Structure formats: structure tokens, C-alpha cells
Amino acid sequence: MPPALATHELCKRYGDRVALDGVDLEVGPGELVGLLGPNGAGKSTLVKIACGLVHPSGGHAEVAGAPAGSPAARAALGYLAELFRFPGWCTADELLGLHQRLAGSPGASAERADLLELVGLSDAAGRRVEQLSKGMQQRLGIAQALVGQPAVVLLDEPTSALDPAGRRAVRGMLEELRRRGVAVLLNSHLLGEIEQVCDRVAIVARGRLVAEGTPGELGRPGGVEIETAAGTRSFSDAGREDVPALVAGLVGKGERIYAVRVVQGTLEDAYLRAIEEAQR
Amino acid sequence: MRGLGTVVGYALRESLRRRVLTVVCLLTAAFLGLYAWGASAVFDEVAPPAGGLIALDTQVLTGATLLGMAMFVTLFLGVVLAVFLTLGAVRGDAERGLLQPLVVRPVGRRTLLAGRFAASAGVCVLYVVAVYAGAVVITGLIGGFWPGSVVLPAFGLAGAVVVVVALTLLGTTLLGTTANGIAVFMLFGAGLTAGLLGQIGDALSSPTLTNVSDIAVWALPFEALYQDALFALTADIEGVTGVLVQLGPLGGADDAGALLWVWAGVYALGAALLGARAFDRADL
């Protein structure tokens, strides 16, 4: 089975400005991958190339084994842009119906009802888009991206207009997509969100892929803290395997030990470290 | 071209729901009402044909002049409709984020553009034909003037707005909404100016002016189609009345022949293909 999304040496230049500089990235079937990077790093360009909205300057991208931008590739993906707008005159149900026809989806009204329920908009099916709040429009956008049961969904900042409850609902939706076997590339600035839901994280900076791995792999150990009667002692270079020796040493010196903590680096630490190294 | 019908339906529904067509229909009804009122007043004041050295048929002269002016207004309204239906269809919609969710669907960019063209051209053709027919009926019922050819002028107007739709769609693949609107209206103005230059050239017997006008009018074939439509309207009027009428109320009448239709078709198709090519290459 081909990867849901694969890019090989993907490059994009806008005049003299390099937006992407040889990015190799793979999203497996049913995998949930988070794409992180500072503003202007090239994340949205990568997503747009995968959708066929932007033409690459070099390298290539494939969606479900088909060249990005080809009808087969477009049939296999769903997309929600960062800056999207839907026609204000049509209702939520009509919008999904339009996308069903454009995508050639045979789902009919059952699919529309299912998608509206998934994003919590069942009661708003007959309301015009212009009458929906920004957050509701964003949830409708996610439903639109899922029309036709795509193999891969590309979400560009899908929670930027949502309140905390809305973000939690989107996390639930992403879990549901994982359960359904849909691959997701999630482009977001919300590290905590990505850490919670993504199987793997890719960090892009200055158009290059600078780090990749599971959130656990990227968040490497950050030392050991031991609470003693004299206060907290920190051992910044130590790891979990050093704990017995450290405790034995302190006890041997007559210290009383009350607690031991292995400090795990967060994804935020890993992200900032990767960006800093890329900018050197 | 799978999905063409969906795109056409979407574009038509958009026109209806955004009340573009409602506003246009109300304004057009107002225009036709005023036209009927004006025509009635003018025909009441025009003296009936009288014998004499110069056999001038005032009813025919008045009817043809009024209908010629109505055709100009019809073309103008049709062009306004064509421009406002299509001026932001690509760049404008892409800048607002409306286009991207549609482009990523399997139907493809060319189908989207073809659908917008078919919907806009269809609406504009129906519109100009309906307004022209209304003006013909009003002129005939009030003043008793019926053009020798009713159908050919309608074809000319329809062809002219189709060319404008094609040009506007080409423009929207290259320019933003405002810039495209300005560009198309300037082209329309240039066509009108070329027509007036030709009229002046004829009056002054200046071959240079006439040649410049001919080249400009063929470079902007919506004007040539309009002139051909005017000619078809007045071609069968004879004598002094015919000479006076064929000076034309605005821009003059000119028999361009069948070659014009071939050229206009190639021109519109060429503009559409260039637009499709530019749209294919655009980063959105």
C-alpha cells in the first residue's frame, strides 16, 4: 500500500525566495502527523503542493501513490486551508452537497448528516454559512474536507478560530479519523495539541525538514531532580538509568531522599531546540 | 469535463442567491419602462411622413434611431452584467479563499473555468436577447417600426457579450478583481471610441481614421459585432431615410460579413484557452 502522502526532494522558489528546499516527508496510511514550524517556514507551501494548488520548482509529491495535483491524487485527499472562505449564500448542507458532487461522492444525504454530526453541526444543516460563527465555519470546513471519505486529510491550522471546547472537539474528531484509518497531516502552531494527538511530528524551518520523530523521541530527557532534606538537587546531564547510582551516592553521604523525578523534555523544548539549530 | 454541470449550477445559484439577477432584472424593467415612456413621447411628437422633394420617413427614422440607442444600452448593460459575474472568478476568489476548496476537488481547473464561462455567457446571452426583444416589441407596438431583421441583431449582441465574458475570464486569471474590472471597462471604452472614430472618419472621408477604426474594432470584436448588429437592424431601409439611419445613433453601422463571426469565435476561444493556460500555471 503506497504512503498516504510522500514528498521527495520537494523544492519551491518564489523568485529569489526559497520556500521549500528539498523536503522528504512521508505520512503512512492511517497515520496522524503533525507539521510544525515558525511562520514562513514553508509548511503551508508543502500542504498546497500536496493539494495541487501550488506547483513545485523541483522534486515531487505523491498522494496515495498518484502525482500530487492529478485527478487521482485530488480524489484521494481532503483539504482545509488556513485562510478559507465558503460562499455565505449557501447552507451548510448545500455546501457539503456541492463538494459531494465535485468529489464524485456517492454518500448522498446520509454522508452529509454523518459529517455534520461528527463536527457537531447537525442543528445548523439548514443555516446559511454567513449566519455561522467563525468557529462553526471552521468545523464545517473540517466536514467539507472529509467529504468522499478521503484516504488523507490535510488540515492547515484547523483550530485557529476555535475556543478550548472546540479544540477539544477537533481532537476528538482526529481520534475518530485515526479510528477510521484516515491519514492526517496536521499543520498547527499549537504544540500541546500536536503532542496529544499526533503519532509523529515533523519540524520544518527555513524550508527544510529539521527534525522528525514521535513526540516521545523528540522530547529527550532533561535531567534528574532529587528532593533531599537540604532541598532539591538537580543533575541536568543525568537520565533514568543514572537514578540508582545518584540515590546511592546521596544516601551514602547521609542525605535523606524524599522524591526522585526524571525530567522529560517537552515537544516545545524539542521544537525550540530544532529551530535554534536550524537558524545557526 | 466531468462535473461541468455542477459548476454551472453552482455559478447560476450564486447569481440568484446573491441577488445579482434580481437587481439586474429590476433595473432592466425600469429601463424598459423609461424606454417605453420616452418612445411614446417621441413618436407622438414626430410628424407623420409627408410628400415632398425629400421622401423622409420620420416614423422609420425615429424607430430605427430609438432602437439603435436601445441596442447600445442593451450591450452596455450586458457588458456590465458579464463583467460583474466574472471579474473575480479566479484571482479574486483565490484571494478571498473561496476558490481553493473547489480547485482541490477532482473536477480540475479547466472544468471550473469552463463552468464559469458557460454559466456567465448563458446568463448574459439570455439577458441581452430578452432586453433587445423587449425594446423591439416596445418600439413596434408604440411607433409601428419593426426592423427588417429581428434575429441577426440579437445574434450580434449575444456574440458581443460572449466575447466580453471570455475577455473578463482571461483577465481574472491574470489580474485581481479591481484591476480586471478596470481593464475590461477600458477595453469596452476603447471599442466604443474606435467605433466613433470610424464614424468621424466616414464623415470626413479620412481613410486613415477609417483604417485605424477598422483595425481597432476587429481587435476588439465585441464592437465589430455591435456594429454588424446595427447594420442588420437598418439594412433594408431605403432612400434618404436609409442614408440618415445608417449614419447610426452611436458608433455607426457596418456590414462585417460572415468572416467576423469566424474571427469572433476564434477570438473568444483563444481568450478562453489563454485563460485556461494561465489558470493551469497559477499558484493559488
Image (spheres, helix red, strand yellow):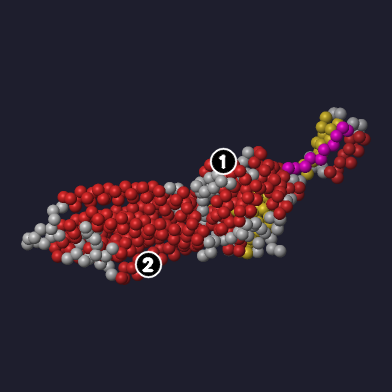
Q: Quick check: is B256 in the magenta stretch? A: no
Q: Is residue B38 left or right of residue A21?
A: left
Q: What chain does mark 2 sit on?
A: B
Q: Which residue lies furthest to the left in this view?
A: B53
Q: Quick check: is A262 in the magenta stretch? A: yes
Q: Identify which residue, A129 or B250, lies in the foreground.
A: A129
Q: Identify which residue, A83 or A92, lies in the foreground.
A: A92
Q: Identify which residue, A164 or A53, lies in the foreground.
A: A164
* Amino acid type of the residue that numbered disc 2 sits on in the rendered structure: Gly
Dominant secondary structure of the magenta stretch? strand
Instruction: Tell me, for residue B265, which label it has, or none.
Output: 2
Judging by the rendered image, the residue that carries numbered circle 1 is: A133
Residue A28, position in %: x, y?
Answer: 70, 58
Residue A224, position in %: x, y?
Answer: 81, 39
At numbered mark 1, what does the secondary structure look like: helix, strand or loop? Answer: loop
Q: In this view, does A206 lie above or below B232?
A: above
> Marks 1/2: CA distance?
46 Å
* Amino acid type of the residue that numbered disc 1 sits on in the rendered structure: Ser
Report the span colored magenta: A257-266
